[in-house]
Image: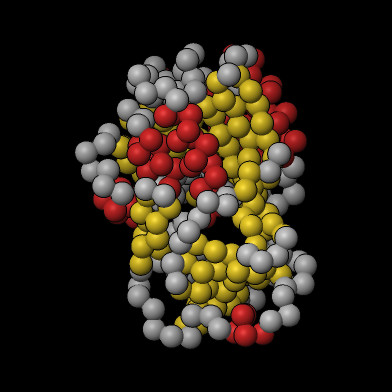
Amino acid sequence: MSRIANQWKDYTCFDAGNGEKLEQWKGIVLRRPDPQAIWPAKQNTNLWQDTDAIYHRSDKGGGHWEYRKKLPESWTINYKDLTFKVSPTGFKHTGLFPEQAVNWDWMSDLIKKYPNEEIRVLNLFAYTGGATMACAKAGAAEVVHVDASKGMVQWAKENRDLCGLQNHKIRFIVDDCLKFVEREKRRGHTYHGILMDPPSYGRGPNGEMWKFEKEVTKLIQACAEILDKDALFFLINSYTTGFSSIVLDNTLRTMILPDHPNGIVETGEIALPIANRDLLLPCGIYGSWQRK
């Protein structure tokens, strides 16, 4: 099943193709590489040339932005009742993955269904906190936000302030995700919602190596042990090329469902609609478990 992030007003994917995507971020048009977009782009040179900034990859890795006009260092973008800081980074990203809005809605809707429950949420590889803010705004009693990057956690704190969530219980932690989960198990802490967005490769704050296919099942198993008996949801996203959503389906059915049989497993792809074309831009896969 595909989850399509089609509720945006401040973000639009104008087009995608020939290894690139063309996006509008609240009036600012960015052109970035996207290895999934192997089909032809629209034959509209004005559309693709009238951009404010283009990201060029380097043959040696990384890349740089070519600015066609002077842009602010950062600006804000709204999604429903959430506000986030956007800023082009040296790794082509902007600090926000717009396709994840469909998961923010999914979690928010689940949390709002149980207003009388004290729902604790753990967000791993939490980046700049899109999901953190969505869960807090929806009424989660506590959200624990864990990421190995001090800079990303600081950015998430800015997003908390932009969303007006200063008085909500959000704990920001710079740590290796697996080590944190293992400590939470020893402390006897449990969570009603756990989500993770692990990278293909990465390093923890103390140089811990992360490789998705080697580490992810260990992390899911550790998370299963701190998923509360009255759990509400579990969610994993993956952008790792070559992994099928069936892998996540099998993993959740063998590692989450046995101890939480009163739930539903769903897996599939996440996508963004491409404006004025009957096409979708694939943006990774997801696997979810939710209370029946």
The residue positioned 45% from the left and 72% from the top of the image is 27
Q: In the rendering, at what x and y percent does residue 155 appear? A: 34, 55
- Vertical side of 65 occupied by 21: above or below: above
Q: Is residue 138 left or right of residue 226?
A: left
* Residue 181 in sight: no
The residue positioned 55% from the left and 45% from the top of the image is 102
Q: Is residue 146 left or right of residue 290?
A: left
Q: In the rendering, at what x and y percent does residue 167 appear? A: 22, 38
Q: Is residue 40 left or right of residue 135?
A: right
Q: Is residue 39 left or right of residue 7?
A: right
Q: In the rendering, at what x and y percent does residue 120 appear? A: 38, 26
As drawn, which residue projects farthest toward the left? 167
Place residue 32 in its image quadrant: bottom right
Quarter in which the C terminus is drawn = top right
Near-viewer residue (31 or 200)? 31
The residue positioned 43% from the left and 52% from the top of the image is 79
Quarter in which the N terminus is drawn = top right
- Vertical side of 73 occupied by 155: above or below: above
